Amino acid sequence: MLKVLAHSWPLLLGVMLLMVGNGVQGTLLGVRGALEGFSTLQLSIVMSSYFAGFLLGSQVTPAMIRRVGHVRVFSALGSLISAVLILYPLVLDWTAWSVMRVLIGFCFSGIYITAESWLNNTASNETRGQALSAYMIVQMLGIIVSQGLLALGDPGGFGLFIIPSVLVSLAFMPLLLADTPAPTFDDVKRFGFARLWATSPLGCVGMLLTGGIFSAMFGMASVWGAMSALTLTQIAAYGGALYVGGLVLQYPVGWASDRMDRRKLIMGLSLTGAVVMVVATIVPLPFVLILIVALILGGMINPLYSLLIALTNDYLVKEDMPGASAGMIFLNGFGAIFGPLASGWLMGLIGKGGYFLFLGMLFLALGLYSAWRISRRPTLPRPSHFTGLSPNASSLAVGAVMTQEGPKSRAG
């Protein structure tokens, strides 16, 4: 790991600064929007717009990189992010925010793809697994730090919008000044959705559902916090707890995943998440218990995402994994677009309890579908190795992880 850090620290530092900037603006908009009188539906559209842009960026960025190269794409997208972050408090209109969120999502998707290309290029076959693990850790740490930073400012002013713009600008310095050559970008062999469904129906359904859970969980957290009359510090603590839970539970879930039927683990985590969400919906909880709910929620969804990747990997040959990863990320992103919209509609209908109720419904659907899939296909004798992944990762990182420990051949 020390060797990886010695070679990749500029990239990892840049990624962490990017995540701090992205994490601040993601939570801040929900709080500031509530202060400006935006409705729950309007804020849900604003939050969903990020994921629409993110999905679009994942499809368009590879062609941009092939046409003009990594450095130009990286610089152009970074400049646009910094500009948009400063424009938010100047244009206090939810439709304008929605357009800007599409741009932000598009740009961050391209930034992640470019950074992950660089990471793959700097790592050797022997160190790539460690490098990707370090990359996922700094992503989560960046989000956790962003929530602490958010608690120190005033959401009604300009400062909290300027800080992420500065952090994003600073993030490019270590990346662009690193003494590593610009990486190549190879075309990924297509892996059709029909074939992906035939390979792993649970992987496809799970990716759609976890996309909705993750986007609603994090995108609407600040909106739910404002409806619950939480302070900015409490909202930031809740957002940080979501990622702390994911960081803590990734390893124990991964350890169990390599020793049992992954589908049973997916079912168990999903049903646990459903029960906890129903309790949080029905029972008025003090803030200390709300933080425990957040730890459990984050601890369920982040490992579930990685489990679904690993489960699909179990039924693929190595050559198909990069193409399959692109399809899975597309499904996850497509589900993510509707998460804030559906949860926002439910919150507008029944109040703040709609936040946890929506998450519980998706967890329950995934748990029940997992149970049905267990009855339809026998357990594999030798699963591939589990690697923790962040739902923020692009298909490039996911494909690199999938090819690390993939089987030599396996019938779908």
Image (cartoon, rainbow, N blue to C red):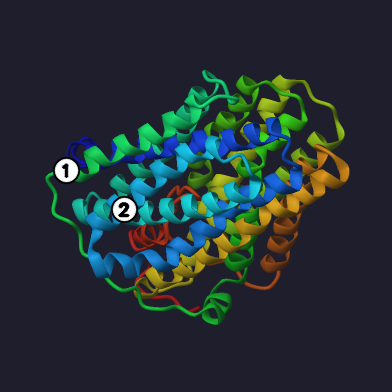
Which image quadrant for residue 338? Answer: bottom right
Relative image position of residue 222 (x, y in whole percent): 65, 34
Q: Nearer the viewer, mark 1 or mark 2?
A: 2
Task: State the SS at label 1.
Answer: loop
Quadrant containing the N terminus is top left
Q: Nearer the viewer, residue 289 or 341?
A: 341
Residue 120, relative to residue 26: is it above or below?
below
Any mark on residue 76, and which? 2
Number of numbered discs visible in the structure rendering: 2
User: Which of the pair 60/378 is nearer the observer?
Assistant: 60
Q: CA distance from mark 1 to mark 2?
A: 18 Å
- Seen at 57% across and 79% down, the residue is 198
What's the residue type where badge 2 is placed? Ala
Residue 193 badge:
none
**Badge 1: how crowded within 10 Å, few (<14), some, or many (20+)?**
some
Say if residue 259 shows up in the picture. no
Callout 2: helix, strand or loop? helix
- Looking at the image, which residue is at 42% across and 50% down? 108
Query: What is the x, y in percent for residue 294?
Result: 65, 33
State the residue at coordinates (44%, 30%).
162
Near-viewer residue (50 or 91) = 91
Indicate the position of residue 396 as horizontal and vertical percent values.
36, 60
- Horizontally, is 251 left or right of 154 in the view? left
The correct choice, above or below, for 144 with respect to 388 in the image is: above
Three-letter amino acid code at the position of disc 1: Ala
| Crowd class of label 2 (few under 14; some 14 to 19; many from 20; radius 10 Å) | few
- 150 relative position to 371: left or right: left
Q: Is residue 318 left or right of residue 372?
A: left
Residue for badge 1: 178
Task: Confirm whether residue 146 shows in the render.
Answer: yes
